[in-house]
Image: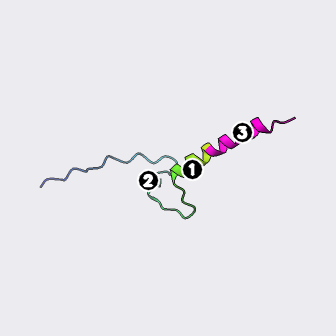
């Protein structure tokens, strides 16, 4: 009898109950990471432009 070797590495030890949290599917808004990065950069640009063109008195 020979045992098959596991192809995946061992999972990390549980820390504060966060073991294998990435496998859980939750309800809610699903946003692509690319959109989130583009939106963040656009918000920063708009904030800088507002500060340049509309300075506080």
Q: Position of residue 1 (x, y in %)?
A: 12, 55
Q: Where is residue 14 in the image (x, y as percent from the top left)?
A: 45, 48
User: From mark 1 to mark 2, how far is it between C-alphas?
Assistant: 24 Å
Q: What kind of element bears circle 1?
A: helix
Taking 40 as reference, is 49 left or right? Answer: right
The colour scheme used to paint the residues is rainbow
What is the residue that sits farthest to the right in this orientation?
57
What is the residue that sits farthest to the bottom in this orientation?
27
User: From mark 2 to mark 3, how far is it between C-alphas?
Assistant: 43 Å
**Numbered disc in front, either 1 or 2:** 1
Query: Which sits earlier in the primary sequence, circle 2 or circle 3?
Result: 2
Q: What kind of element bears circle 2?
A: loop
What secondary structure is the magenta-colored segment mainly? helix
Return the residue nearer the eye: 47 or 52: 52
The residue beneath circle 2 is 20
**Numbered disc in front, either 1 or 3:** 3
**Quarter of the rendering occupied by the C terminus:** top right
Residue bounds of the magenta highlight: 42-57
The residue beneath circle 3 is 49
Q: Residue at point 51% right, 49% down?
A: 34
Return the residue nearer the eye: 24 or 19: 24
Task: Please say if the residues under marks 1 and 3 sit with CB atoms less than 8 Å apart.
Answer: no
User: From mark 1 to mark 3, how far is it between C-alphas?
Assistant: 20 Å
Q: Position of residue 51 (x, y in %)?
A: 76, 37
Total residue callouts: 3
Q: What kind of element bears circle 3?
A: helix
The residue beneath circle 1 is 36
> Does the magenta segment cover residue 1?
no
> Does the magenta segment cover residue 51?
yes
């Amino acid at each position: 009898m020979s045992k098959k070797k596991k192809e995946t590495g061992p999972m990390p030890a549980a820390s504060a109950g966060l073991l294998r949290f990435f496998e859980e599917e939750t309800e809610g808004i699903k946003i692509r990471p690319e959109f989130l990065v583009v939106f963040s950069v656009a918000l920063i640009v708009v904030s800088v432009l507002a500060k340049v063109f509309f300075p506080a008195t």
